[in-house]
Image: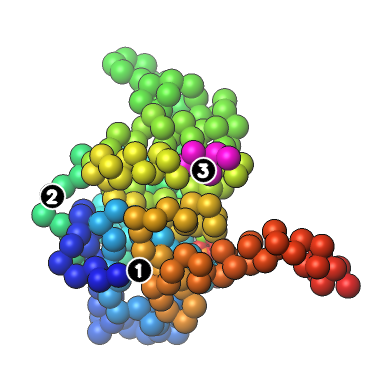
Amino acid sequence: MNLENIGQYIRSVELQRDKIPSFTRYPFCLSAIRNLYNLKFHPKVTFIVGENGTGKSTILEAIATAYGFNPEGGTKNFNFSSMDTHSELHDYLKMVKGVSKPKDGFFLRAESFYNVATNIDELDKGGGGRRIIDSYGGKSLHEQSHGESFLALLINKFRGKGIYILDEPEAALSPTRQMTIVSRIHELVEQGSQFIIATHSPIIMAYPNAVIYEIKEGFKMVEYEETEHYQVMRDFLNNTQKMLDILME
Ligand SMILES: Nc1ncnc2c1ncn2[C@@H]1O[C@H](COP(=O)(O)OP(=O)(O)OP(=O)(O)O)[C@@H](O)[C@H]1O
Ligand SMILES: [Mg+2]
């Protein structure tokens, strides 16, 4: 797909390679980053997929931070910090934004969603005014299951015309609920939203109004059926016994 001259809130990021002191240490040593020049985003949905440890969370966090989100996740209003583990990659990304500005936004990290939930509870303890949790469905995210609280976030908090950067939104969700996520993504896209999503879910990455970048040596644009995730899952479901025999021999 040609992504020239179209774009939404985030059009592309360019790695300012000449400013990078050395490609031998994290995060610059990752082959995904060593081979990164310019990454163009789909105006609706961009998926970043690939094996564990290829750098999906690293690039997502850098894009979110470069855009002004708290590296640990949340809306732009969150600025808590519980650990300072994010990389400096965002300092070397030049971001090209679209002409219009989003009205909503969220950076979801599976690993630190717990901290976002804690932060909301703490802010609401102060009392007075409208409770923050009300815009998340009203029930403390800590009093819901992992999957339920994710879904509450997507359904109640995301309002459309937004930029949503999601790291493994399928975490803790059943296959049926992953399909719910696909229809929610579609609703929000129809309401003028843009998503950048790192995922391992063959269900979520099937969403068609999208490009998929698979990280191998670098970021490669692929079709859904070409992704390793799709092929492995298809082969496993079509030949379960044969695959199990191989795995257990
Ligand atoms: N703070 C850090 N310092 C050094 N290396 C790190 C740091 N954070 C991550 N790494 C390494 O960088 C690589 C990419 O990590 P990253 O979390 O971006 O992978 P990922 O593609 O999101 O993987 P997963 O699918 O398991 O979530 C991994 O090999 C990881 O060990
Ligand atoms: Mg990750």
Position in image of residue 56 (x %, y %): 46, 64
Q: Which residue is mark 3?
A: 179
Residue under the image location 41 percent in, 32 percent down: 155
Q: Tell me, what colour scheme is on the image?
A: rainbow
The mark closer to the camera, 1 or 3, is 3
Q: Which residue is mark 2?
A: 100
| Rendered position, 5 above or below 141 | below
Give the quarter of the image for residue 182: top left
Q: Secondary structure at mark 2?
A: loop
Q: Which residue is mark 1?
A: 89
In reply to whether residue 177 is colored magenta, the answer given is: yes
Q: Quadrant of the C terminus?
A: bottom right
Q: Which residue is nearer to you in this view: 65 or 126?
A: 65
Q: Which numbered disc flags the more N-terminal residue, 2 or 3? A: 2
Q: Secondary structure at mark 3?
A: helix
In reply to whether residue 27 is colored magenta, the answer given is: no
Q: Which residues are magenta?
A: 176-181
Label 2–label 1 contact, CB within 8 A: no
